[in-house]
Protein backbone atom coordinates (compact mmCIF):
# COMPACT_ATOMS: atom_id res chain seq x y z
CA UNK A 1 0.00 0.00 0.00
CA UNK A 2 1.22 3.50 -0.79
CA UNK A 3 0.27 6.72 1.05
CA UNK A 4 0.35 10.06 -0.76
CA UNK A 5 -0.18 13.33 1.12
CA UNK A 6 -1.52 16.39 -0.67
CA UNK A 7 1.14 19.05 -1.21
CA UNK A 8 -1.18 21.64 0.35
CA UNK A 9 -2.78 20.20 3.47
CA UNK A 10 -3.32 21.29 7.05
CA UNK A 11 -2.79 24.64 8.76
CA UNK A 12 -2.81 27.68 6.51
CA UNK A 13 -0.72 30.78 7.21
CA UNK A 14 -3.52 32.60 9.07
CA UNK A 15 -4.31 29.63 11.33
CA UNK A 16 -0.62 29.03 12.13
CA UNK A 17 -0.31 32.69 13.06
CA UNK A 18 -3.44 32.60 15.27
CA UNK A 19 -2.18 29.51 17.11
CA UNK A 20 1.23 31.13 17.59
CA UNK A 21 -0.40 34.25 19.08
CA UNK A 22 -2.54 32.15 21.44
CA UNK A 23 0.54 30.11 22.46
CA UNK A 24 2.38 33.33 23.28
CA UNK A 25 -0.53 34.59 25.37
CA UNK A 26 -0.72 31.28 27.27
CA UNK A 27 3.06 31.26 27.85
CA UNK A 28 3.05 34.83 29.16
CA UNK A 29 0.12 34.27 31.55
CA UNK A 30 1.60 32.93 34.73
CA UNK A 31 -0.80 34.64 37.10
CA UNK A 32 -3.83 32.53 38.05
CA UNK A 33 -5.94 35.69 38.34
CA UNK A 34 -5.45 36.47 34.68
CA UNK A 35 -8.07 34.94 32.43
CA UNK A 36 -7.60 34.09 28.77
CA UNK A 37 -10.56 34.05 26.40
CA UNK A 38 -11.01 33.43 22.71
CA UNK A 39 -14.01 34.89 20.96
CA UNK A 40 -15.34 31.69 19.42
CA UNK A 41 -13.09 28.61 19.08
CA UNK A 42 -9.57 29.61 17.96
CA UNK A 43 -10.01 27.15 15.08
CA UNK A 44 -12.71 24.68 14.09
CA UNK A 45 -10.94 21.68 15.55
CA UNK A 46 -12.25 20.08 18.70
CA UNK A 47 -8.96 18.36 19.62
CA UNK A 48 -7.10 21.68 19.49
CA UNK A 49 -9.72 23.60 21.48
CA UNK A 50 -9.79 20.83 24.10
CA UNK A 51 -6.01 21.13 24.42
CA UNK A 52 -6.25 24.89 25.02
CA UNK A 53 -9.07 24.39 27.51
CA UNK A 54 -6.67 22.31 29.55
CA UNK A 55 -4.24 25.24 29.41
CA UNK A 56 -6.83 27.60 30.90
CA UNK A 57 -8.31 29.11 27.73
CA UNK A 58 -12.06 29.76 27.81
CA UNK A 59 -14.16 30.09 24.68
CA UNK A 60 -16.83 32.78 24.78
CA UNK A 61 -19.43 33.69 22.19
CA UNK A 62 -19.81 37.33 23.18
CA UNK A 63 -17.71 39.83 25.13
CA UNK A 64 -20.47 39.95 27.77
CA UNK A 65 -19.65 36.30 28.57
CA UNK A 66 -16.30 37.20 30.14
CA UNK A 67 -16.58 36.23 33.76
CA UNK A 68 -13.26 37.62 35.01
CA UNK A 69 -13.00 40.98 36.68
CA UNK A 70 -12.78 44.04 34.44
CA UNK A 71 -9.41 45.44 33.51
CA UNK A 72 -6.12 44.07 32.29
CA UNK A 73 -6.56 40.75 34.09
CA UNK A 74 -8.72 39.71 31.13
CA UNK A 75 -6.96 38.76 27.92
CA UNK A 76 -9.00 38.22 24.81
CA UNK A 77 -7.76 36.70 21.57
CA UNK A 78 -9.58 37.49 18.33
CA UNK A 79 -9.30 34.45 16.07
CA UNK A 80 -8.24 34.39 12.41
CA UNK A 81 -11.84 34.95 11.18
CA UNK A 82 -11.74 38.44 12.66
CA UNK A 83 -14.56 40.28 14.43
CA UNK A 84 -16.83 43.30 13.86
CA UNK A 85 -15.59 46.76 14.86
CA UNK A 86 -18.18 46.85 17.67
CA UNK A 87 -16.33 44.00 19.41
CA UNK A 88 -13.10 46.04 19.54
CA UNK A 89 -15.10 48.97 20.99
CA UNK A 90 -16.63 46.68 23.64
CA UNK A 91 -13.22 45.30 24.61
CA UNK A 92 -11.83 48.80 24.92
CA UNK A 93 -14.79 49.82 27.11
CA UNK A 94 -14.06 47.07 29.63
CA UNK A 95 -10.31 47.73 29.45
CA UNK A 96 -9.39 44.13 28.65
CA UNK A 97 -6.16 43.32 26.86
CA UNK A 98 -6.70 42.43 23.22
CA UNK A 99 -4.56 40.08 21.12
CA UNK A 100 -5.64 40.36 17.53
CA UNK A 101 -5.06 37.14 15.56
CA UNK A 102 -7.27 38.22 12.65
CA UNK A 103 -5.65 36.80 9.53
CA UNK A 104 -3.95 39.68 7.67
CA UNK A 105 -5.88 38.71 4.52
CA UNK A 106 -9.18 39.10 6.40
CA UNK A 107 -7.96 42.36 7.96
CA UNK A 108 -7.31 43.66 4.45
CA UNK A 109 -10.95 42.95 3.47
CA UNK A 110 -12.20 44.70 6.62
CA UNK A 111 -10.08 47.74 5.69
CA UNK A 112 -11.35 47.66 2.09
CA UNK A 113 -15.03 47.70 3.08
CA UNK A 114 -14.44 50.28 5.80
CA UNK A 115 -12.61 52.66 3.43
CA UNK A 116 -15.09 52.26 0.59
CA UNK A 117 -18.17 52.55 2.83
CA UNK A 118 -16.76 55.78 4.31
CA UNK A 119 -16.67 57.39 0.85
CA UNK A 120 -20.17 56.36 -0.14
CA UNK A 121 -19.77 52.95 -1.76
CA UNK A 122 -22.44 50.28 -1.35
CA UNK A 123 -20.79 47.08 -0.15
CA UNK A 124 -21.58 43.61 -1.45
CA UNK A 125 -19.98 40.63 0.31
CA UNK A 126 -20.03 37.37 -1.65
CA UNK A 127 -20.13 34.69 1.02
CA UNK A 128 -22.15 32.98 3.71
CA UNK A 129 -23.91 35.61 5.84
CA UNK A 130 -23.81 33.37 8.91
CA UNK A 131 -20.08 32.70 8.76
CA UNK A 132 -18.15 34.57 11.47
CA UNK A 133 -15.69 35.99 8.94
CA UNK A 134 -18.53 37.56 6.93
CA UNK A 135 -20.28 38.80 10.09
CA UNK A 136 -16.96 40.38 11.07
CA UNK A 137 -16.39 42.04 7.68
CA UNK A 138 -19.93 43.41 7.65
CA UNK A 139 -19.24 44.91 11.06
CA UNK A 140 -16.65 47.21 9.46
CA UNK A 141 -19.26 48.90 7.27
CA UNK A 142 -21.97 49.38 9.91
CA UNK A 143 -23.62 46.07 8.97
CA UNK A 144 -24.90 47.72 5.81
CA UNK A 145 -23.45 45.24 3.33
CA UNK A 146 -25.59 43.08 1.08
CA UNK A 147 -24.46 39.46 1.43
CA UNK A 148 -25.02 36.98 -1.40
CA UNK A 149 -23.80 33.46 -1.96
CA UNK A 150 -25.51 32.43 -5.18
CA UNK A 151 -26.00 33.72 -8.71
CA UNK A 152 -29.73 33.74 -8.06
CA UNK A 153 -29.33 35.99 -5.00
CA UNK A 154 -27.01 38.31 -6.94
CA UNK A 155 -29.60 38.64 -9.70
CA UNK A 156 -32.21 39.65 -7.13
CA UNK A 157 -30.22 42.58 -5.70
CA UNK A 158 -32.28 45.72 -6.16
CA UNK A 159 -30.84 48.75 -8.03
CA UNK A 160 -28.68 50.98 -5.80
CA UNK A 161 -27.68 54.62 -5.92
CA UNK A 162 -23.94 55.20 -5.90
CA UNK A 163 -20.89 53.06 -6.62
CA UNK A 164 -20.56 49.44 -5.53
CA UNK A 165 -17.62 47.64 -3.93
CA UNK A 166 -17.61 43.83 -4.04
CA UNK A 167 -15.47 41.56 -1.84
CA UNK A 168 -15.46 37.81 -1.21
CA UNK A 169 -15.32 35.61 1.87
CA UNK A 170 -11.76 34.24 1.80
CA UNK A 171 -12.91 30.63 1.53
CA UNK A 172 -15.57 31.17 -1.12
CA UNK A 173 -15.82 28.84 -4.13
CA UNK A 174 -13.90 30.47 -7.00
CA UNK A 175 -16.22 29.16 -9.74
CA UNK A 176 -19.38 30.53 -8.09
CA UNK A 177 -17.53 33.81 -7.40
CA UNK A 178 -16.69 34.18 -11.12
CA UNK A 179 -20.33 33.62 -12.08
CA UNK A 180 -21.58 36.12 -9.49
CA UNK A 181 -19.06 38.73 -10.65
CA UNK A 182 -20.42 38.51 -14.22
CA UNK A 183 -23.93 39.22 -12.90
CA UNK A 184 -22.82 42.13 -10.70
CA UNK A 185 -20.77 43.76 -13.46
CA UNK A 186 -23.78 43.68 -15.74
CA UNK A 187 -26.07 45.03 -13.03
CA UNK A 188 -23.93 47.87 -11.69
CA UNK A 189 -22.05 50.20 -13.99
CA UNK A 190 -19.81 51.67 -11.32
CA UNK A 191 -18.62 48.49 -9.65
CA UNK A 192 -15.19 47.82 -8.09
CA UNK A 193 -14.43 44.12 -7.75
CA UNK A 194 -11.92 42.86 -5.17
CA UNK A 195 -11.28 39.14 -5.50
CA UNK A 196 -10.36 38.45 -1.88
CA UNK A 197 -10.54 34.65 -2.05
CA UNK A 198 -7.49 33.35 -0.24
CA UNK A 199 -4.80 31.56 -2.22
CA UNK A 200 -4.53 28.92 0.54
CA UNK A 201 -8.12 27.80 -0.10
CA UNK A 202 -7.53 27.54 -3.81
CA UNK A 203 -4.27 25.67 -3.39
CA UNK A 204 -5.82 23.13 -1.02
CA UNK A 205 -8.80 22.53 -3.31
CA UNK A 206 -6.67 22.23 -6.47
CA UNK A 207 -4.13 19.94 -4.80
CA UNK A 208 -6.78 17.62 -3.36
CA UNK A 209 -8.52 17.43 -6.74
CA UNK A 210 -5.23 16.42 -8.37
CA UNK A 211 -4.42 13.88 -5.69
CA UNK A 212 -7.90 12.36 -5.68
CA UNK A 213 -7.50 11.49 -9.35
CA UNK A 214 -4.30 9.50 -8.61
CA UNK A 215 -5.47 7.34 -5.69
CA UNK A 216 -7.95 4.56 -4.87
CA UNK A 217 -9.22 6.12 -1.64
CA UNK A 218 -9.02 9.61 -0.16
CA UNK A 219 -8.92 10.30 3.57
CA UNK A 220 -9.86 13.88 4.44
CA UNK A 221 -8.87 14.86 7.98
CA UNK A 222 -10.48 17.75 9.81
CA UNK A 223 -13.24 19.00 12.08
CA UNK A 224 -16.78 17.88 11.27
CA UNK A 225 -17.82 21.56 11.48
CA UNK A 226 -14.89 22.97 9.53
CA UNK A 227 -16.38 24.38 6.32
CA UNK A 228 -13.12 24.21 4.40
CA UNK A 229 -12.62 20.54 5.40
CA UNK A 230 -16.18 19.70 4.32
CA UNK A 231 -15.48 21.40 1.01
CA UNK A 232 -12.33 19.30 0.47
CA UNK A 233 -14.31 16.15 1.26
CA UNK A 234 -17.04 17.05 -1.21
CA UNK A 235 -14.49 17.76 -3.98
CA UNK A 236 -12.79 14.40 -3.39
CA UNK A 237 -16.11 12.51 -3.23
CA UNK A 238 -16.88 13.64 -6.77
CA UNK A 239 -13.71 11.94 -7.97
CA UNK A 240 -13.01 8.89 -5.80
CA UNK A 241 -14.17 6.91 -2.77
CA UNK A 242 -13.60 9.29 0.16
CA UNK A 243 -13.85 9.20 3.93
CA UNK A 244 -13.86 12.21 6.26
CA UNK A 245 -12.39 11.68 9.72
CA UNK A 246 -11.54 13.99 12.61
CA UNK A 247 -8.77 11.90 14.16
CA UNK A 248 -7.08 8.51 13.84
CA UNK A 249 -9.73 7.09 16.19
CA UNK A 250 -12.38 7.56 13.51
CA UNK A 251 -10.36 5.52 11.03
CA UNK A 252 -11.61 1.98 10.58
CA UNK A 253 -8.57 0.27 9.04
CA UNK A 254 -10.68 -2.44 7.43
CA UNK A 255 -11.89 0.18 4.94
CA UNK A 256 -8.35 0.39 3.53
CA UNK A 257 -8.15 -3.22 2.40
CA UNK A 258 -8.13 -3.69 -1.34
CA UNK A 259 -6.88 -0.12 -1.94
CA UNK A 260 -3.38 0.18 -3.39
CA UNK A 261 -2.90 3.93 -3.12
CA UNK A 262 -4.33 6.04 -0.28
CA UNK A 263 -4.45 9.84 -0.59
CA UNK A 264 -4.49 12.11 2.45
CA UNK A 265 -5.49 15.72 2.73
CA UNK A 266 -6.52 17.91 5.66
CA UNK A 267 -8.44 21.13 6.24
CA UNK A 268 -6.75 24.43 7.08
CA UNK A 269 -7.56 23.93 10.77
CA UNK A 270 -6.04 20.45 11.12
CA UNK A 271 -2.72 20.37 13.01
CA UNK A 272 0.21 18.32 11.72
CA UNK A 273 0.16 16.04 14.77
CA UNK A 274 -3.32 14.80 13.89
CA UNK A 275 -2.29 14.20 10.25
CA UNK A 276 0.87 12.39 11.40
CA UNK A 277 -1.03 10.19 13.83
CA UNK A 278 -3.38 9.03 11.04
CA UNK A 279 -0.41 8.19 8.80
CA UNK A 280 1.25 6.34 11.68
CA UNK A 281 -1.87 4.30 12.35
CA UNK A 282 -1.98 3.19 8.70
CA UNK A 283 1.78 2.54 8.61
CA UNK A 284 1.57 0.40 11.73
CA UNK A 285 -0.93 -1.81 9.95
CA UNK A 286 1.63 -3.39 7.64
CA UNK A 287 3.55 -2.95 4.40
CA UNK A 288 3.20 0.73 3.64
CA UNK A 289 5.25 2.87 1.31
CA UNK A 290 5.01 6.50 2.41
CA UNK A 291 5.41 8.95 -0.43
CA UNK A 292 5.43 12.19 1.61
CA UNK A 293 3.88 15.18 -0.12
CA UNK A 294 2.43 14.28 -3.52
FE1 LIG B 1 -6.08 33.50 6.27
FE2 LIG B 1 -6.46 32.26 4.04
FE3 LIG B 1 -6.09 30.89 6.20
S1 LIG B 1 -7.55 34.05 4.74
S2 LIG B 1 -6.94 32.16 7.80
S3 LIG B 1 -4.59 32.24 5.21
S4 LIG B 1 -7.51 30.36 4.58
Image (tube, rainbow, N blue to C red):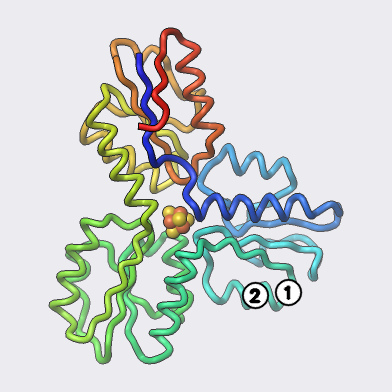
Residue 77, percent across and down?
64, 60
Residue 96, percent across and down?
74, 69
Q: Which residue is mark 1?
A: 94
In the displayed structure, would residue 1 be above or below residue 292? above
Quarter location, residue 146: bottom left
Q: Residue at x 22, y 76 (%)?
A: 157
Q: Secondary structure at mark 2?
A: helix
Q: Is residue 93 left or right of residue 215?
A: right
The quarter of the image holding the N terminus is: top left
Q: Residue at x 77, y 57 (%)?
A: 35
Residue neighbourhood size for the residue with mark 1, other residues' Cα within 10 Å, grouped as few (<14), some (14–19), many (≥20): some
Quarter location, residue 39: bottom right
Q: Which residue is mark 2?
A: 90
Question: Distance from label 2 to label 1 (Cα)?
Answer: 7 Å
Q: Residue at x 20, y 84 (%)?
A: 159
Residue neighbourhood size for the residue with mark 2, other residues' Cα within 10 Å, grouped as few (<14), some (14–19), many (≥20): some
Q: Residue at x 33, y 37 (%)?
A: 233
Residue located farthest toward the left when viewing the structure as drawn: 186
- Residue 136's tag is none
Q: Secondary structure at mark 1?
A: loop
In the displayed structure, would residue 109 be above or below residue 114? above
Total labels drawn: 2
Amino acid sequence: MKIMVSKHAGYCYGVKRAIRILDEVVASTANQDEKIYTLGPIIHNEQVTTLYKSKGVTIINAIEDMTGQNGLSNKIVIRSHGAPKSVYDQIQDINAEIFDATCPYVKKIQNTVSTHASIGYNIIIVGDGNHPEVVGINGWCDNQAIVVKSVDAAQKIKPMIGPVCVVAQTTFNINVWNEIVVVLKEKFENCVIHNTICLATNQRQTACRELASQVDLMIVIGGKHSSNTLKLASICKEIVNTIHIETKDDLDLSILSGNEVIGITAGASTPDWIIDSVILKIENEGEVFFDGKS
